[in-house]
């Protein structure tokens, strides 16, 4: 749990209150001017009603320049940021031709496959030449090339499940599969900080949705017991099935899922487990196989494994991997295969264009590199590097007195900012020193818990990280976000002991 | 009075129940030996007693150094100035009424009898004389207040014990995650061994491909491949981030500007997947309480968007303008607040599920009459309809500003992937923070954005591609006009030629099987690759099943003649075998 200093909470509320009051004042004058100019809606209702876009107009636009910064190169360890300017107080931003070279601490390029790679890129180009840029057809029609079938098998083998299916987009994977698995009369128990795609999928399914406290197995158990005993609302019939939905690494918290405990609880209460490994697959574990490998969980215990290729693999799309179950009934042995079932029912598979062949080839090659099948040890090096980099960076940040969330080994590390004014300040000051960071505020996080998020990559060198730490430390002093006392430096400690002697 | 009442009441409780006085009790204890009154001020009620003038005097006469309570009704009182300690036993009924109290009581009785006697306190009810009716009514009020102040009766709640919950959890058996697979779900689609162009290779044989929506034949176009290659070398494959967090690459912005320029709109926004375009854009504009009138034949992406928006959804009959007008009229009349809520009509330009074309001119008239906004999906008409490929608006000669929101997938005629939405600047800017598929998903791989830019360039340079496509569709129509057993139900201008069984076999399953047999035989014996329309269990669209032929500008005349010939020979033979 995050505990906010009392004074900080107060000032944060005050800042938001001030912003809100000013926004209201501006809206008031806006309304007068609009009334003066007479409405031009001609009988249509406005696209945004009332306060729906208040946040965007009055809060977001002020700090628009911290988000959506265009780049003009691959999102590698360093990238070329396109400079922008505004003539109307940040309302619109215009691109310039000027580029600035910045250290990238924002992209999900965990393994460094984002940039052109000596092994992957030539193969992706080869795939482009052979299979072209698209299939113009869903997988079930004319969209399954030999490359796609090979990818399905390769992914299944990599994540350690009997079968897998690849989709063209990670978001769609989640939001189209959950409705296939569960419907009315089912119960989805979802972590309170799950990604929007999971929330959308759950909503689309029509099942009852209950939220449990973020990453708290004890609360999950409590919720499960309560709802199994209670049954469906009103009718009190038993639930048809229960699916517990969790993520491997929470992208806004940098926390690892408490998977062993959650698996045990799901087993005990016969609930199915849906694990979204969007950020963890490829990034953690000894051979990059995600949280299951890192935390020592048998993949057979996770019923549905989902992940994306956008992050570690530097491609696009998502996958779903599932078990084969054989049921012995009195008459015959029935085969239950999740993936085969999805191939005939999942709308993303039936209607969505198949994943683009070069992207598919990129995933294949990246997995080959990770497994050392390319004949080098680059994969193992990358995996070791990301771990070392993450743990080094995290411990250094903590030593400096920043409030850093998340667990060791996780390449995502949020630094708490709290006050809304510190969001643009931190981002702009870092950018001045050519370090590009991601800052996040409401509504992606709770109102009080604005943060900056650092994503570490295997392509960062030690010099890069040291430089980044220097800049962040300096900016941290300037902005005032070192909420904990800094650990005294080693040399000082030694000096002191000498004096005492 | 009050104190006395409470006091005796408390004393009564004190003695009757044989228990120690609780803090709410106040007892008057009278000692026959020493003749002083003892007040046990153990409660807030004491305040009333203390301030009542009758007892104040009595109280002030003595002071007690300590009062100790023994079991039950025995009090141990230590009086200051007295030599001995005394034990007092409380007994009811032996409390003599003090003089002052008697006075007060006497006055009260006098007052009461006076009140009873008073003329205004007499009443006749149905001839019966009632004396002191005010008193009776007052009493009634007291009773009513008393009853009202009581808590209503509730059965006691008995929550389940842990053991009971354990048992319930043990007893509960979930359904299997997925149902048992029926046999027809075990076959696999054919695998392509080369690009999905007009001709492709399946199991080593070159076949004519009518399964890919590669309408303009741009798949494998040299210009596209070149731009993709240079983009792959420069940017890598993926963008590794959502648009907000360094996932915006300059080609994305160029692509957005290129699309807007091509269509003549102020701005456009890119999505990373065709399917996600609609189910993100619709919930961004329509919320709970808003109304969406939608054609019942729309594809799943739109259906899902409608569901996620939680708006009120009204379906009109597929491509039936009379039905649309009826519904619009009904909504406008019935909903008094219709002017204040957002109202949308959602249509597809060319329906993916049926190959029909929406009559845009009529829809525009209706939309303007009833003041609905129009959202149109141009996935299968962008680059296809109109003399320069600008879609349905060009086809009908309607200015694009009349359509509020235009969406399209880029995985069809543009031979890339992803989707876009275009419209006024307000519409686009709103999506940049409110559209979940845009905000929360990694952006389109940059090489696909380059592909889309090049595709539009190629399209603009070669308008003859569209003419070629039109000719090809006409060729297929002419060749299939005499087809036995199947009829064409799509629009003659649509690039999707939809063949439906003339006589259904009676069940959807056997219809599908029959069509699958036709498709199978076409692929095996005639090297023609066609697909049967598939439907997900989640799809609510009620349209019939059939064979969908995706015509491409890349098909040669010989290809299409071969397709017609094969269909003309295979369909009757399969249908006859069945009978």
Image (spheres, helix red, strand yellow):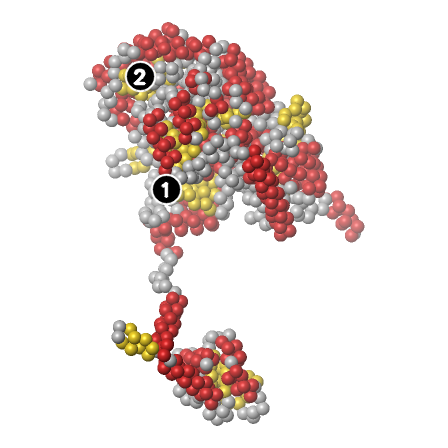
Residue A186 numbered mark, or none: 1
Residue A279 numbered mark, or none: none
Nearer the camera: disc 2 or disc 1: 2
Q: Determine crowd level at label 2: few under 14, some 14-19, many 20+ residues with C-alpha closer than 10 A.
A: many
Q: Residue at x 58, y 91 (%)?
A: B81
- A492 or B388: nearer the eye? B388
Q: Determine crowd level at label 1: few under 14, some 14-19, many 20+ residues with C-alpha closer than 10 A.
A: many
**x%, y% of residue A194?**
49, 40
Q: Which residue is drawn at 42% across and 24% down?
A: B364
Above or below: residue A431 compared with residue B148: above
Residue bearing mark 2:
B488
> Can you see residue A157?
no
Please report contact status of discs 2 and 1: CB closer than 8 Å, yes or no.
Answer: no
Image quadrant assignment for residue A87: top right
Q: Mark 1 belongs to which subunit?
A: A
Q: Residue at x 70, y 33 (%)?
A: A433
Q: Is mark 1 on a helix, strand or loop?
A: loop
Above or below: residue B516 compared with residue A6: above
Q: How far apart are marks 2 and 1 (CA)?
A: 42 Å
**x%, y% of residue A113?**
57, 26
- B56 or A12: nearer the eye? B56
**x%, y% of residue A321?**
43, 32
**x%, y% of residue B369?**
41, 28
> Can you see residue A26?
yes
Q: What element carries label 2?
A: strand
Query: Relative to B62, is B521 on the left or the right?
Result: left
Q: Mark 2 belongs to which subunit?
A: B
Furthest-left residue in this view: B579
Image quadrant assignment for residue B496: top left
């Amino acid at each position: 749990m995050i505990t906010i200093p009392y004074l900080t909470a107060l000032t944060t509320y005050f800042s938001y209150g001030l912003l809100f009051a000013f926004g209201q004042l501006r809206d008031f004058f806006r309304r007068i001017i609009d009334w003066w100019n007479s409405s031009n809606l001609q009988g249509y209702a406005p696209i945004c009603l009332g306060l729906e876009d208040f946040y965007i107009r009055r809060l977001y636009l002020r700090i628009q320049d911290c988000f959506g910064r265009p780049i003009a190169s691959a999102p590698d360890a360093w990238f070329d940021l396109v400079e922008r300017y505004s003539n109307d107080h940040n309302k619109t931003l215009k691109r310039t031709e000027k580029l600035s070279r910045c250290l990238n601490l924002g992209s999900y390029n965990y393994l460094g496959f984002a940039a052109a790679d000596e092994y992957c890129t030539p193969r992706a180009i080869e795939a482009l030449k052979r299979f072209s840029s698209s299939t113009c057809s869903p997988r079930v029609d004319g969209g399954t090339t030999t490359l796609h079938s090979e990818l399905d098998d390769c992914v299944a083998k990599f994540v350690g499940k009997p079968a897998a299916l690849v989709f063209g987009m990670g978001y769609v994977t989640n939001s189209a599969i959950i409705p296939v698995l569960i419907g009315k009369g089912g119960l989805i128990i979802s972590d309170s900080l799950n990604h929007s795609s999971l929330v959308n999928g759950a909503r689309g399914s029509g099942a009852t949705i209950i939220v449990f406290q973020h990453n708290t197995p004890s609360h999950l158990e409590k919720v499960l017991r309560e709802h199994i005993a209670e049954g469906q609302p009103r009718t009190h019939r038993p639930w048809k099935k229960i699916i517990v939905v969790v993520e491997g690494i929470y992208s806004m918290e940098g926390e690892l899922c408490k998977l062993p405990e959650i698996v045990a609880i799901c087993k005990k209460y016969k609930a199915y487990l849906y694990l979204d490994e969007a950020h963890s697959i490829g990034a953690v574990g000894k051979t990059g196989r995600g949280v299951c490998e890192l935390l020592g969980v048998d993949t057979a215990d996770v019923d549905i494994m989902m992940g994306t290729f956008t992050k570690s693999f530097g491609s696009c799309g998502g996958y779903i991997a599932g078990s084969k179950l054989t049921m012995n009934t009195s008459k015959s042995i029935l085969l239950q295969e999740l993936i085969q079932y999805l191939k005939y029912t999942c709308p993303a598979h039936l209607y969505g264009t198949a994943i683009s062949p070069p992207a598919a080839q990129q995933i294949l090659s990246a997995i080959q590199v990770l497994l050392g099948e390319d004949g080098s040890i680059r994969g193992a090096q990358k995996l070791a590097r990301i771990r070392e980099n993450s743990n080094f960076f995290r411990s250094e940040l903590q030593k400096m007195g920043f409030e850093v969330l998340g667990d060791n080994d996780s390449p995502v590390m949020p630094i708490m900012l709290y006050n809304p004014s510190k969001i643009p300040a931190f981002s702009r000051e870092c950018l001045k020193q050519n370090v590009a960071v991601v800052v996040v505020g409401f509504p992606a996080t709770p109102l009080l818990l604005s943060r900056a998020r650092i994503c570490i990559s295997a392509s960062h060198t030690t010099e890069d990280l040291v430089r980044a730490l220097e800049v962040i430390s300096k900016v941290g002093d300037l902005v005032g976000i070192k909420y904990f006392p800094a650990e005294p430096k080693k040399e000082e400690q030694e000096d002191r002991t000498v004096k005492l002697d | 009075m009050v104190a006395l009442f409470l006091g005796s009441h408390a004393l009564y409780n004190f003695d009757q129940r044989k228990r120690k006085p609780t803090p709410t009790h106040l007892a008057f204890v009278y000692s026959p030996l020493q003749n002083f009154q003892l007040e046990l001020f153990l409660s807030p009620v004491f305040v009333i007693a203390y301030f009542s003038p009758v007892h104040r005097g009595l109280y002030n006469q003595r002071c007690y150094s300590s009062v100790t309570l023994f079991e039950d009704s025995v009090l141990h009182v230590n009086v200051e100035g007295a030599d001995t300690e005394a034990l007092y036993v409380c007994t009811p009924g032996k409390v003599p009424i003090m003089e002052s109290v008697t006075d007060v009581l006497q006055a009260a009785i006098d007052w009461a009898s006076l009140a009873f006697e008073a003329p205004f306190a007499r009443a006749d009810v149905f001839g019966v004389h009632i004396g002191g009716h005010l008193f009776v009514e007052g009493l009634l009020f007291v009773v009513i207040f008393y009853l009202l102040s009581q808590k209503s009766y509730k059965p006691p709640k008995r929550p389940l014990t842990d053991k009971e919950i354990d048992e319930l959890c043990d007893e509960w058996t979930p359904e299997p995650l997925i149902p048992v697979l029926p046999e027809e779900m075990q076959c696999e689609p054919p695998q392509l061994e080369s690009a999905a162009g007009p001709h492709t290779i399946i199991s080593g044989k070159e076949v004519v491909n009518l399964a890919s929506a590669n309408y303009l034949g741009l798949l494998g176009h040299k210009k596209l491949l070149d731009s993709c290659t240079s983009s792959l070398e420069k940017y890598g494959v993926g963008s590794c981030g959502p648009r907000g967090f360094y996932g915006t690459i300059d080609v994305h912005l160029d692509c957005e500007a290129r699309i807007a320029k091509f269509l003549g709109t102020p701005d456009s926004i890119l999505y990373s997947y065709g399917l996600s375009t609609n189910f993100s854009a619709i919930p961004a504009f329509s919320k709970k309480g808003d109304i969406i009138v939608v054609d019942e034949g729309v594809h799943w992406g739109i259906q899902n968007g409608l569901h996620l928006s939680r708006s009120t959804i009204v379906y009109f009959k597929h491509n039936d303008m009379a039905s649309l007008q009826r519904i619009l009229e009904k909504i406008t009349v019935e909903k008094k607040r219709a002017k204040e809520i957002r109202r949308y009509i959602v249509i597809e330009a060319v329906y993916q599920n049926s190959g029909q074309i929406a009559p845009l001119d009529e829809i525009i008239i209706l939309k303007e009459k009833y003041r609905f906004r129009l959202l149109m999906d141009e996935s299968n008409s962008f680059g296809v309809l109109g003399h320069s490929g600008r879609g349905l608006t060009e086809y009908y000669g309607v200015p694009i500003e009349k359509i509020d929101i235009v969406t399209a997938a880029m995985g069809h005629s543009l031979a890339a992937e992803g989707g876009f939405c275009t419209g006024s600047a307000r519409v686009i800017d709103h999506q940049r923070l409110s559209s979940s598929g845009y905000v929360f998903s990694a952006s389109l791989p940059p090489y696909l954005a380059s592909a889309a830019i090049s595709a539009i360039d190629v399209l603009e340079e070669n308008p003859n591609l569209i003419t070629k496509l039109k000719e090809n569709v006409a060729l297929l129509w002419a060749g299939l006009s005499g087809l036995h057993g199947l009829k064409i139900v799509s629009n003659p201008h649509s690039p999707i030629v939809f063949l439906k069984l003339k006589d259904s076999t009676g069940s959807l399953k056997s219809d599908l099987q029959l069509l699958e047999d036709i498709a199978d035989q076409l692929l095996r014996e005639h090297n023609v690759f066609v697909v049967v329309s598939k439907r997900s269990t989640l799809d609510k669209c009620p349209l019939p099943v059939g064979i969908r032929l995706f015509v491409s500008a890349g098909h040669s005349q010989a290809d299409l003649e071969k397709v017609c010939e094969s269909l003309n020979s295979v369909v009757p033979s399969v249908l006859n075998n069945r009978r």
